[in-house]
Image: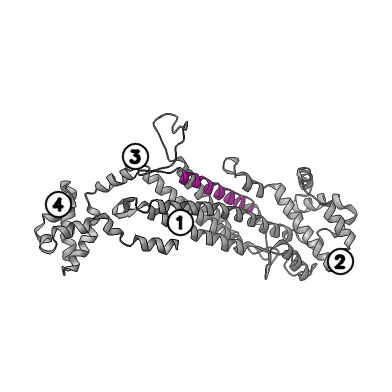
Amino acid sequence: MIERYTRKEMGHIWSELNKFRLWLRVEIAVCRAWHKLGKIPEEALREIEKRTFVDEKVVEKIYQYERVYKHDVLAFVSAINEQIQEYSHYFHMGLTSSDVVDTALALQIREALELIIQELDRVIERLRSLALEHKSTLMMGRTHGVHAEPMTLGLKFLSWYEELKRNKERLLQALGTVSYGKLSGAVGTYSNLEPEVEKLALQELGLKVEPVSTQIVPRDRHAQVMYALASTAGALERFATEIRHLQRTEVLELMEPFEKGQRGSSAMPHKKNPIHAERLCGLARIIRANLLVALENIPLWHERDISHSSAERVILPDSTIALHYMLGLFLEMLEGLVVNPERMRKNMELSHGLYGSSRVLVRLMEKGVPRDKAYDMVQRCAMRSWEEGISFEKSLMEDQEVSVFLSQEEIRQALDPWSFLKHIDQIYKRSLD
């Protein structure tokens, strides 16, 4: 991922330095396991633990070897062997490259997901606060982009809050699913290893043993991680799209923050564009596209080929970095969000009270009017309201057929926007309690 969208903490997780340090952590855990089984002497283990390290100079040494070997794990092993020399025959003993790479990758993904979940928690808490703050901020609900029925801004935020809670559960499930390692050799049969070595080393690393591995950890685990990332990004895209629509000049009910000194257009000084919301939508497309790559990484040849490797080196860092950035940006948007209740009220008036058609329909049905007849009566009054630009209330009250069944007071009660929201407390209680 480009530097523009890379925050420092997540960037470090996917740095080459951190990757090689995790590889070394796996190798040392294996050495300790071999020591417990009597294969590595105490003195040798202590020297390996004391001498081995990875810093920027070691990373460069690895690169030097790789330019010759064309194999990054062997390059890593040779660089570390320089540090332990006479004990090098104990290092990487019995392992295949993917034992180290896949196990370390699980640690790397775990670090990334934990950081994302921390950031997600902050966004969830902010949405909860906004939902409570705007529980009674009346606005028009829309379907197909058209006025539907009254709701509140708080309910919209509450919907977002619930969706991100579900995505947190998906991320936690993915975290558990990916927290598996394998130290079982070339085709998963422990030909030069012992299952006990795998068990002991993975226990130290806080990972579970892949029940049946090949040369690799099966990639359906990583695909589940990518789905959780894509689903969360898709949720943010949905919220951002809503803000974009509500910031349109003709609507102007919400606006993302526009800071002092900020400029919106090189040509039009008046512009306040929803650039942050648009950026979220663009980055979500990348993560969603990367999910397809992760799914295509599942069907590898036989016990493993390497076609997944190059793809994962792009999609896993890029997707976690992008989502971490998106969450931070969305939190900034929520903290500075401009809410315009007066414009919400005026926009509700644009449809002359037609949002009440459903309640009038039901009131007529409760009076014994057949549904189709009631529908025709309400639609007739609604079309008159649209075409003549008069209030729906007036159209209903002047309709002789409607007046047979509904009094003027009953019509007014049916059109009261708050009558649509009599169960809002129950919805909030269901979500927040």
Vertical position of residue 278 compared to residue 229: above or below: above
* Magenta region: 312-335
Q: Which amino acid does label 1 sit on?
A: Tyr
Please name the residue shown 78% across and 49% down the image. 69
Which of the numbered marks, if any, corresponds to residue 39?
2
- Asked which secondary structure carries label 4, the reply is helix
Q: Which of marks 3 and 1 is nearer the N terminus?
A: 1
Which of the numbered marks, if any, corresponds to residue 394?
4
Q: Earlier in the sequence, mark 1 or mark 4?
A: 1
- Asked which secondary structure carries label 2, the reply is loop
Which of the numbered marks, if any, corresponds to residue 161?
1
Determine crowd level at label 3: few under 14, some 14-19, many 20+ residues with C-alpha closer than 10 A. few
Q: What residue type is labelled 4?
A: Lys
Outermost residue toward the left? 400
Q: How far is disc 2 from disc 1 in space, using C-alphas?
A: 54 Å
Residue 145 is situated, as x and y percent measured from the top left of the image, at: 32, 50
Vertical position of residue 104 compared to residue 198: above or below: above
Which residue in the protein does label 3 denote? 249
Judged by depth in the image, the label closer to the viewer, 4 or 3, is: 4
Quadrant in which the C terminus appears: bottom left
Q: How far is disc 2 from disc 4 in space, using C-alphas?
A: 92 Å
- Asked which secondary structure carries label 1, the reply is helix
Q: Is mark 3 in CB contact (under 8 Å) with mark 1?
A: no
Judged by depth in the image, the label closer to the viewer, 3 or 1, is: 1
Q: Which of marks 2 and 3 is nearer the N terminus?
A: 2
Q: What predominant SS class does the magenta segment belong to?
A: helix
